[in-house]
Image (cartoon, grey):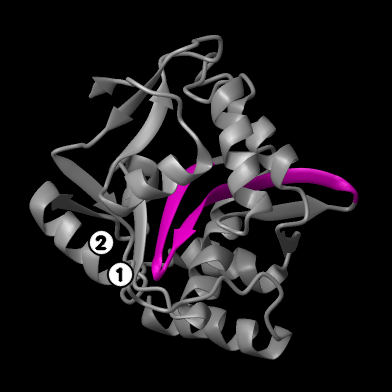
């Protein structure tokens, strides 16, 4: 972990992601960002994604409307907001501004879960070639962020992505088959993935998306 030495711009962010670095702040109010390059990296398999049975049943019930890129700034703000398990956040104002700029450039994306007009869950991250770097997620209703993750995986598969970076392995992500990958192997996979001509399908054909989600259930 290193203290930043220069102004971070959206262009610098993309160069950093390309070589396996990502920024974090020590707290919501911090004015300094740090580059992280973990020895072990959490990677969610796009082929071999594990969909828990209970969650598969919830998906069939379609409890939420799922969208992409409809409310990016709200999603990142919710991810940064205090929660019972984590009153502080590594997402400060500068990170929110940088990712919002990347979103405007088409490099950052969000998945949203809606209950009526209420935004109840979601996640966001960065796409670069065939790599997607998941940054953070939030949930204000049962399974909302988990269902958003399933929809992200389905979209990435449809778009030809080959790598879904989760940064760190956690007990929450382990249920989806997340692997811990050594730094050298991760960077090898990353170098290959960023050269893949993938695209993020924010608004895929409903039938194609439904088939991809059904395939995830079948693979579980």
Secondary structure found at label 1? helix
Q: Where is residue 23 in the image (x, y as percent from the top left)?
A: 39, 32
The part of the chain drawn in magenta is 117-136
Vertical relation: 131 (above or below) 79 = below
Res. 54 in view: yes
Is 11 magenta? The answer is no
Vertical relation: 185 (above or below) 129 = above
Q: Where is residue 28 in the image (x, y as percent from the top left)?
A: 54, 15
Image point (63%, 43%), residue name: 101
- Would you name the residue on which mark 2 appears? 190
Q: Residue 193 carries which label?
A: 1
Image quadrant in which the N terminus is located: top left
Q: Which residue lies furthest to the right in this view?
A: 117
Secondary structure found at label 2? helix
Q: Position of residue 128 (x, y in %)?
A: 43, 61
Q: Do the residues labelled 1 and 2 touch (CB within 8 Å)?
A: yes
Magenta stretch, main secondary structure, is strand
Foreground pick, 122 / 30: 30
Q: How crowded is mark 2: few (under 14 residues within 10 Å), some or many (20 or more)?
A: many
Is 129 magenta? The answer is yes
Q: In which image quadrant can residue 105 be found?
A: bottom right
Image point (25%, 50%), residue name: 19
């Amino acid at each position: 972990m290193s203290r930043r030495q220069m102004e971070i711009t959206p262009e610098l962010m993309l160069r950093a992601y390309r070589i396996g670095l990502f920024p974090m702040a020590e707290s919501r109010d911090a004015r300094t960002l740090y580059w992280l390059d973990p020895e072990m990296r959490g990677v969610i398999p796009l082929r071999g994604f594990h969909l828990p049975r209970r969650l598969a049943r919830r998906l069939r019930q379609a409890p939420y409307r799922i969208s992409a890129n409809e409310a990016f700034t709200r999603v990142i703000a919710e991810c940064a907001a205090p929660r019972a398990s984590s009153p502080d956040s590594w997402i400060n104002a500068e990170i929110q501004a940088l990712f919002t700029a990347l979103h405007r450039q088409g490099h950052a994306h969000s998945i949203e879960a809606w209950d009526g007009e209420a935004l109840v869950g979601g996640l966001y991250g960065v796409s670069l070639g065939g790599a997607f770097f998941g940054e953070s997620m939030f949930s204000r209703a049962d399974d909302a962020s988990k269902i958003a993750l399933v929809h992200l995986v389905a979209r990435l598969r449809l778009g030809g992505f080959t790598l879904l970076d989760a940064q760190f392995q956690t007990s929450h992500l382990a249920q989806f088959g997340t692997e811990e990958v050594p730094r050298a192997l991760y960077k090898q996979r990353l170098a290959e993935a960023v050269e893949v001509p993938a695209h993020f399908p924010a608004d895929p054909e409903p039938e194609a998306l439904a088939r991809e989600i059904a395939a995830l259930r079948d693979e579980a």
